[in-house]
Image (tube, helix red, strand yellow):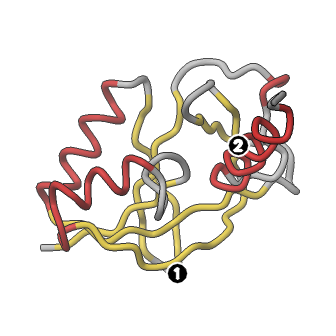
Amino acid sequence: MSKRILVYGSLRNGEYNFQSFQRVFGNNIKYEKTLEIEGFSLYSLGPYPGINKSLNKNSKLTVDILNVNEVVYNQIKEMELGAGYKEEFVNIDGEQLPIYVYKYPLNKEYIVESGDWSSYLKSKRNEAVHNFNF
């Protein structure tokens, strides 16, 4: 039986945890599509992101929908719960999909305004390359 889940950080298509899970689980983790959802703010926690419910009506979060089997779902859930996240559900086209929300307070100075972790990482990598002194 397959499950659909929402991811916004290292499990997004092309990011390191997605690639790791694909190496281990093959076709049991599949990217479906990317979309924006409302109601969450994205924050940088350093090497990974966290989200919380947003009071800002204009906040958008870029997520990927992944299709996974039960084993992969349980592995992802265990990883997220062990790292300080809690499972919540978001209605996408009439279906309640799980997403992992950071359960501790987040510092507003580390908000990622774009709501897109992959774009944020790409800009940080480009900034690091640009600032490198030869």
**Residue at the location (47% across, 46% down)?**
10
**Residue at the location (45% across, 69% down)?**
65
Q: Along the line of sight, which residue is nearer the eye, 113 or 124?
A: 124
**Residue at the location (34% across, 69% down)?**
4
Q: Quadrant where the C terminus lies? A: top right
Q: Along the line of sight, which residue is nearer the eye, 29 or 22?
A: 22
Q: Amino acid at mark 2?
A: Arg
Q: Quadrant where the N terminus lies? A: bottom left
Residue on which disc 1 sits: 93
Q: Is disc 2 in contact with disc 1, using a CB cutoff of under 8 Å?
A: no
Q: Along the line of sight, which residue is nearer the eye, 48 or 126?
A: 126
Q: Along the line of sight, which residue is nearer the eye, 131 or 42?
A: 131
Q: Is residue 114 above or below residue 69?
A: above
Task: Check disc 1 and report its element: helix, strand or loop.
Answer: loop
Say the numbered circle drawn on residue 64: none
- Tell me the quarter of the picture where residue 30 sits: bottom left
**Distance between the Cα atoms at labels 2 and 1?**
35 Å
Q: Nearer the viewer, mark 2 or mark 1?
A: 2
Q: Along the polypeptide, which appears first: circle 2 or circle 1?
A: 1
Residue on which disc 2 sits: 125
Q: Is residue 3 above or below residue 129?
A: below
Q: Amino acid at mark 1?
A: Asp
Task: Check disc 2 and report its element: helix, strand or loop.
Answer: helix
Estimate how packed mark 2 is, as few (under 14), some (14 to 19) or many (20 or more) residues with alpha carbons within 10 Å. Answer: few
